[in-house]
Amino acid sequence: MTPFQITHERGPVTRQIRVAALAWGGEPAWERLLESVSPTCKSRFLKQPGFYEWVESSLALELHEAWAKLRGGDDMTQRGEDGAREILGDLQRWILRLASPTFLMQNIPRIYGFYYQGGRLDLTRLEPGRAEFQLLAQGYPVTWFQDGLSAWLKVALEMTGSPGVLVTYFPPDPATEPHLHRYEVAWQS
């Protein structure tokens, strides 16, 4: 296993799927989803993971893939948006009380490190109205890096009151660094 393999995620990240399933079709939808996954995955999610609990990424991804199949399409952008709202609008709302866009961008690597084991997210540039990040990671589908994390960054920054947020994703270059994802974030100051 590589040091940048994402192996675990915190409970709130995975709970989003349960919330979405309940909103979509109530308990029957959640039960149908659990019936569609492996016995190990079903057993893991019969009880909702706690806030500080680590969930194995392989099982979280299995649940996500089953949810996408049940719904008939990938909703990774929506999961990213919902994740930002849940974490910053509820669980970590203290950050937004203090947050200027700069403060939030400076703390994104810490937030990532709290919610994910594996991979390394670095802030590589920060100036008024602009930030750049590099994420050295693997183990999640491309849509998570491209759509989910980009949506998370956009909504998180909008929650600070920043207008005109734009997140640009640059995929890894397979020839030079096949696991290095880059993000440019811009907002109006």
Image (cartoon, rainbow, N blue to C red):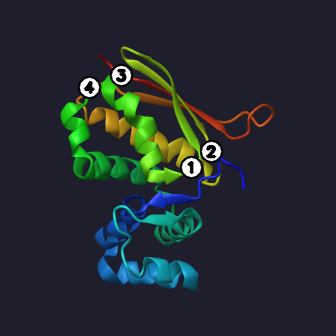
Mark 3 Cα shell of 10 Å, populated few (<14), some (14-19), many (≥20) = some
Residue position marked by numbered label 2 in the rendering: 137
Residue position marked by numbered label 4 in the rendering: 100
Type of the residue with mark 4: Ser
User: From the viewer's perspective, is the residue at label 4 or at label 3 nearer?
Assistant: 4
Type of the residue with mark 2: Ala
Local SS, label 1: helix
Which quarter of the image is occupied by the N terminus? bottom right
Question: Whole-Å distance between the Cαs marked 2 and 4?
Answer: 27 Å
Type of the residue with mark 1: Thr
Asked if the residues shown at circle 1 and circle 3 are in contact, with their CB atoms under 8 angstroms apart, the answer is no
Name above or below for residue 60 compared with residue 95: below
Say whether disc 1 or disc 4 marks the residue closer to the N-terminus: 4
Local SS, label 3: loop
Say whether disc 2 or disc 4 marks the residue closer to the N-terminus: 4
Mark 1 Cα shell of 10 Å, populated few (<14), some (14-19), many (≥20) = some
Question: Whole-Å distance between the Cαs marked 2 and 3?
Answer: 25 Å
Asked if the residues shown at circle 1 and circle 4 are in contact, with their CB atoms under 8 angstroms apart, the answer is no
Q: Position of residue 38 (x, y in %)?
A: 58, 81
Quadrant of residue 52 within the rendered picture: bottom left
Question: Whole-Å distance between the Cαs marked 1 and 4?
Answer: 28 Å
Any mark on residue 33, and which? none
Say whether disc 1 or disc 2 marks the residue closer to the N-terminus: 2
Residue at horizontal 53%, vertical 32%? Answer: 122
Residue position marked by numbered label 3 in the rendering: 187
The number of callouts visible is 4
Local SS, label 4: loop
Residue position marked by numbered label 1 in the rendering: 143
Q: Is residue 100 left or right of residue 141?
A: left
